[in-house]
Amino acid sequence: MLLTKDYCTYFKVAFDSEEEIERVILENVGLLFGDYSLLLSKSKLQTYGGRGSIPDGVLIDFDSKQWYIIEVERGAHGTWQHIAPQVSKQVTAITNEETKARLITQAFDAISELKALRELLAEIDIPEMHIHKELQTILAKSPILALPIDEIPDDLEDYLGTLKVEFKLWTIEKYINDKGEIIYSVPDFTEAKGGPGGTETDSPDAQPRQGNLISSVIQAGILYVGDSVYMDYGPKGKQKTHFTGIIRDSGIELDGKVYSPSIAALRCIQSVSPSRTSSNGWVTWKTRDGALINDAYKKLFK
């Protein structure tokens, strides 16, 4: 049960279908992955044996220089009955170099029709003439398997841990009130459950860690409540605006309100560029000595 600020009570209910979960994720992909990303919906991956495997989406994040296979699932399908066979096909498919080459072409063609995305990529020093090369570099890496799911069945995390790719698990929830109004709960990407899948990672974007991340850093004595943090933002070629926030035990305070690091960064960015819809605050906010708060988080694992 959820109690909203207007004292309206929402009760957790089941999703109508897998397609409903898919719609929630794909319609909000910018909020989840950032503005510097491209979604190829229902892109087809081809296995060596010729059997096609079609995920719900392939996401290319130019900011983190990472790509994702997005596969929406329902826990009721079961780990071994449905999810494992489906995921196994897709993980096998990613080793097909012809598939990667086709994805590069599809992505490049899509970006050619998206002027706004090309302008955003220029902000992070990826001019149009370098986009194709950037795609080749990103898709040469191993992808992250992203699984939004309504409930996590037994053995799913154990199965995913056997894969040779990193994975992310989002638990998506649906709530409804007595007026029939629906809201969805989607955890911040940095707080999704995950695992290395045979690789080592050390940033909030990849750690299998739950809960309030900034609280973990404070409890470890790496950051302190009351510390000031800073960020500068401005569209490419224009003067940057300087912003200051204050570390609190549940996030970063701006103008008397406390937000997660990413939302706090987004509030600052939108004051300059209202069309922006997302930001990764962990690689935006800096401490007094100029270090990213992401660097403070990494110290938890040393």
Image (cartoon, rainbow, N blue to C red):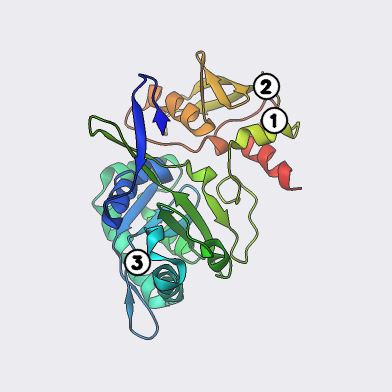
Relative to 22, is 285 on the left or the right?
right
Q: CA distance from mark 1 to mark 2?
A: 7 Å
- What residue is disc 3 on? 103
> Is residue 259 positioned above or below 137 on the image?
above
Relative to 41, is 162 on the left or the right?
right
Q: Amino acid at mark 3?
A: Leu
Label 1 crowd (10 A; few <14 / some 14-19 / many >=20): some
Front position in the image: 3 or 184: 3
Q: Amino acid at mark 2?
A: Val
Residue at 66% of width from left, 40% of height from top?
Answer: 297
**Mark sitting earlier along the chain (2/3):** 3
Q: Which mark is residue 225?
A: 2
**Mark sitting earlier along the chain (1/2):** 1
- What residue is disc 1 on? 218
Q: Amino acid at mark 1?
A: Ile
Front position in the image: 125 or 74: 74
Q: Is residue 34 visible?
A: no
Do the residues under discs 1 and 2 have CB atoms within 8 angstroms? yes
Q: CA distance from mark 1 to mark 3?
A: 42 Å
> Is residue 86 positioned above or below 144 on the image?
below
